[in-house]
Amino acid sequence: MNDLIMKRKREQDFEENVWLCERTEELIHAIEKSRKGIQVYRDVDLEIEELKLEQQGARIGIACFVSRCYPGGDAMRGGNGSEEILCRQSTLYPCLNTEYLRETYYDVNFDCVEGVAAKYFYIPDVVCTVQDKRRNFLMQEYGNSFDVIGCARTEGNVKEDMERMYRIARQKGIDMLVFIMDERDMT
């Protein structure tokens, strides 16, 4: 398949996922639950003392670099980065596209002349919307939802950002953290 056809397929997948998230009662409730737990962090917020949390079963966290100004990055336009893929295959996009995150994350970063004002966010209980063999295998073992830790994509130190996302995961009681990166994050 040529690139244009693949891009249009990704755009359709995104639109179908948004439609599903807006009309499926179970997903609507899951999105409401996730939205209630969203938190935004500045670098200085991460200097707090480590929290001791009780283990409540295995929790999966996905850490990825995300657009600092636009919810879902290029998901609507068929983008194929890690954030865009998650937005096409889960309830992440409706959680990102909220007034709270626009005000506390996207708008402040858009208006920031140098660097970013708010660098990280945490969204609990994002639900997979794609049914395939890999998802079924993963979800049978660990449950139907995962937490997302996003870090604004900048020209900064990738290793340092990954360490800070790991610290957020520890604070939130995440047992298994998966870093998803694409070529933009490898510089």
Image (tube, rainbow, N blue to C red):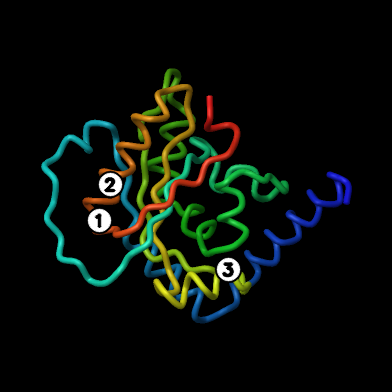
Q: Amino acid at mark 1?
A: Lys
**Label 1 near label 2: C-beta < 8 Å?**
yes
- Mark 3 residue crowding within 10 angstroms, few (<14) / some (14–19) / many (20+): few
Residue highlighted by disc 3? 134
Q: Amino acid at mark 2?
A: Ile
- Mark 1 residue crowding within 10 angstroms, few (<14) / some (14–19) / many (20+): many
Choose mark 3 or mark 1, whichever is in front.
3
69 or 79, which lies in front?
79
Choose mark 2 or mark 3, whichever is in front.
3
Pick whichever of labels 2 and 3 is earlier in the sequence. 3
Q: Secondary structure at mark 1?
A: loop
Q: Residue at x 31, y 36 (%)?
A: 163
Residue 150 circle label: none
Residue highlighted by disc 2? 168
Q: Residue 68: where, in percent of width, then height?
A: 49, 35
Q: Residue at x 39, y 66 (%)?
A: 125
101 or 48, which lies in front?
48
Q: Residue at x 46, y 27 (%)?
A: 111
Q: Is residue 61 above or below residue 69?
A: below
**Label 3 near label 2: C-beta < 8 Å?**
no
Q: Residue 174: where, in percent of width, then height?
A: 29, 58
In whole angstroms, how far apart are the C-alphas of marks 2 and 3? 26 Å
Q: Is residue 120 above or below residue 155?
A: below
**Label 1 near label 3: C-beta < 8 Å?**
no
Numbered-mark total: 3
Q: Secondary structure at mark 3?
A: helix
Q: Secondary structure at mark 2?
A: helix
In whole angstroms, how far apart are the C-alphas of marks 3 and 1? 25 Å
Residue highlighted by disc 1? 172
Q: Amino acid at mark 3?
A: Arg
